[in-house]
Image (cartoon, rainbow, N blue to C red):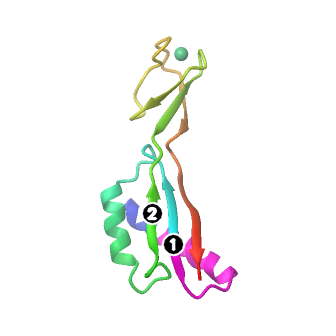
Amino acid sequence: MHELSIVLSIIEIVAMEAKKSGAERVTEVHLEIGQLSGVEFDSLEFALKNFAPGSVIESAEISIEKPGGTARCCNCGYEFSIENFIGSCNLCSSFNLEIIKGRELSVKSITID
Ligand SMILES: [Zn+2]
Protein backbone atom coordinates (compact mmCIF):
# COMPACT_ATOMS: atom_id res chain seq x y z
CA MET A 1 0.00 0.00 0.00
CA HIS A 2 3.10 2.13 0.10
CA GLU A 3 2.82 2.69 -3.65
CA LEU A 4 -0.70 4.01 -3.24
CA SER A 5 0.41 6.87 -1.04
CA ILE A 6 3.29 7.58 -3.42
CA VAL A 7 0.85 7.94 -6.32
CA LEU A 8 -1.41 10.19 -4.26
CA SER A 9 1.49 12.46 -3.40
CA ILE A 10 2.62 12.51 -7.03
CA ILE A 11 -0.86 13.67 -8.04
CA GLU A 12 -0.79 16.25 -5.29
CA ILE A 13 2.58 17.62 -6.42
CA VAL A 14 1.51 17.76 -10.08
CA ALA A 15 -1.80 19.42 -9.17
CA MET A 16 0.03 22.06 -7.17
CA GLU A 17 2.49 22.78 -9.97
CA ALA A 18 -0.28 22.92 -12.57
CA LYS A 19 -2.27 25.33 -10.46
CA LYS A 20 0.75 27.52 -9.86
CA SER A 21 1.34 27.91 -13.59
CA GLY A 22 -2.33 28.19 -14.46
CA ALA A 23 -2.24 25.10 -16.64
CA GLU A 24 -5.39 23.63 -18.04
CA ARG A 25 -3.95 20.27 -18.83
CA VAL A 26 -0.95 18.24 -17.84
CA THR A 27 0.35 16.37 -20.86
CA GLU A 28 3.44 14.73 -19.47
CA VAL A 29 4.77 13.68 -16.11
CA HIS A 30 8.32 12.49 -15.75
CA LEU A 31 9.11 10.55 -12.61
CA GLU A 32 12.43 9.45 -11.25
CA ILE A 33 12.27 6.40 -9.05
CA GLY A 34 15.48 4.62 -8.18
CA GLN A 35 15.88 0.86 -8.15
CA LEU A 36 16.79 1.07 -4.47
CA SER A 37 13.92 3.32 -3.46
CA GLY A 38 11.96 0.33 -2.22
CA VAL A 39 9.15 1.05 -4.66
CA GLU A 40 7.45 -1.93 -6.26
CA PHE A 41 7.15 -0.82 -9.87
CA ASP A 42 4.25 -3.12 -10.74
CA SER A 43 2.24 -1.89 -7.78
CA LEU A 44 3.10 1.67 -8.65
CA GLU A 45 1.86 1.33 -12.20
CA PHE A 46 -1.26 -0.39 -10.97
CA ALA A 47 -1.91 2.44 -8.51
CA LEU A 48 -1.28 5.02 -11.24
CA LYS A 49 -3.83 3.36 -13.50
CA ASN A 50 -6.38 3.36 -10.72
CA PHE A 51 -5.93 6.89 -9.51
CA ALA A 52 -5.17 8.79 -12.69
CA PRO A 53 -8.78 8.88 -14.01
CA GLY A 54 -10.47 12.02 -12.77
CA SER A 55 -7.24 13.48 -11.47
CA VAL A 56 -4.91 16.10 -12.87
CA ILE A 57 -2.75 13.41 -14.48
CA GLU A 58 -5.68 11.78 -16.26
CA SER A 59 -4.52 12.62 -19.78
CA ALA A 60 -0.84 12.86 -19.03
CA GLU A 61 1.72 10.53 -20.42
CA ILE A 62 3.70 9.18 -17.53
CA SER A 63 7.28 8.14 -17.94
CA ILE A 64 9.37 6.65 -15.21
CA GLU A 65 13.12 6.84 -15.10
CA LYS A 66 14.60 4.08 -12.96
CA PRO A 67 18.21 4.82 -12.13
CA GLY A 68 20.13 1.83 -10.88
CA GLY A 69 21.91 1.72 -7.56
CA THR A 70 25.42 3.04 -7.10
CA ALA A 71 27.43 2.70 -3.93
CA ARG A 72 30.62 4.35 -2.80
CA CYS A 73 32.97 2.58 -0.49
CA CYS A 74 33.64 4.68 2.61
CA ASN A 75 36.91 2.87 3.09
CA CYS A 76 38.64 3.20 -0.29
CA GLY A 77 36.32 5.50 -2.25
CA TYR A 78 35.60 2.99 -5.01
CA GLU A 79 32.25 3.48 -6.76
CA PHE A 80 30.30 0.60 -8.24
CA SER A 81 26.77 -0.42 -9.09
CA ILE A 82 24.72 -2.55 -6.72
CA GLU A 83 21.34 -4.19 -6.91
CA ASN A 84 20.46 -4.22 -3.26
CA PHE A 85 21.59 -2.89 0.08
CA ILE A 86 23.52 -5.97 1.01
CA GLY A 87 27.00 -5.95 -0.39
CA SER A 88 30.62 -5.23 0.10
CA CYS A 89 33.19 -3.25 -1.81
CA ASN A 90 34.42 -4.98 -4.95
CA LEU A 91 37.88 -3.63 -4.33
CA CYS A 92 38.61 -3.84 -0.62
CA SER A 93 35.64 -5.94 0.62
CA SER A 94 34.62 -3.31 3.15
CA PHE A 95 30.94 -3.34 4.18
CA ASN A 96 31.06 0.32 4.95
CA LEU A 97 29.16 1.52 1.89
CA GLU A 98 27.25 4.66 1.15
CA ILE A 99 24.40 4.58 -1.36
CA ILE A 100 24.92 7.54 -3.68
CA LYS A 101 22.38 6.68 -6.37
CA GLY A 102 19.23 4.65 -6.75
CA ARG A 103 17.09 5.96 -3.91
CA GLU A 104 15.51 8.76 -5.95
CA LEU A 105 11.80 9.23 -5.61
CA SER A 106 10.64 12.41 -7.24
CA VAL A 107 8.61 14.18 -9.87
CA LYS A 108 11.37 15.29 -12.20
CA SER A 109 9.36 17.38 -14.58
CA ILE A 110 5.88 18.02 -15.83
CA THR A 111 4.71 19.34 -19.17
CA ILE A 112 1.59 21.43 -19.28
CA ASP A 113 -0.72 23.04 -21.76
ZN1 LIG B 1 36.52 -0.31 -0.78
Q: Which residues are magenta?
A: 8-27
* Magenta portion: prevailing SS class: helix
Q: Is residue 109 left or right of residue 48?
A: right
Q: Residue furthest top?
A: 92
Residue occupying image coordinates x 59% and y 15%: 76
Count of numbered marks: 2
- Is residue 81 in the magenta section? no
Residue occupying image coordinates x 50% and y 34%: 70
Image quadrant where one finds the C terminus: bottom right
Using the image as rendered, state which of residue 8 and residue 104 is in the foreground.
104
The label shown at residue 89 is none
Using the image as rendered, state which of residue 95 and residue 80 is in the foreground.
80
Category of crowding for the residue at label 1, using alpha-carbon neighbours closer than 10 angstroms: few (below 14), some (14–19), many (at least 20): some
Residue 38 x %, y % = 41, 48
**Comes first in the chain, label 2 or label 1:** 1
Residue 1 x %, y % = 35, 63
Residue occupying image coordinates x 48% and y 45%: 67
> Against 90, is 10 above or below?
below
Q: What residue is disc 2 on? A: 63
Tag 2's secondary structure? strand
Tag 1's secondary structure? strand
Residue occupying image coordinates x 51% and y 72%: 28
Q: Is residue 35 left or right of residue 24?
A: left
> Against 92, is 12 above or below?
below
Q: What residue is disc 1 on? A: 28
Label 2 with label 1: CB-CB less than 8 Å: yes
Q: Quadrant of residue 51?
A: bottom left
> Against 110, is 95 above or below?
above
Category of crowding for the residue at label 2, using alpha-carbon neighbours closer than 10 angstroms: few (below 14), some (14–19), many (at least 20): few
- Label 2 – label 1 distance at C-alpha: 8 Å
> Against 20, is 36 above or below?
above
Q: Is residue 5 left or right of residue 109?
A: left
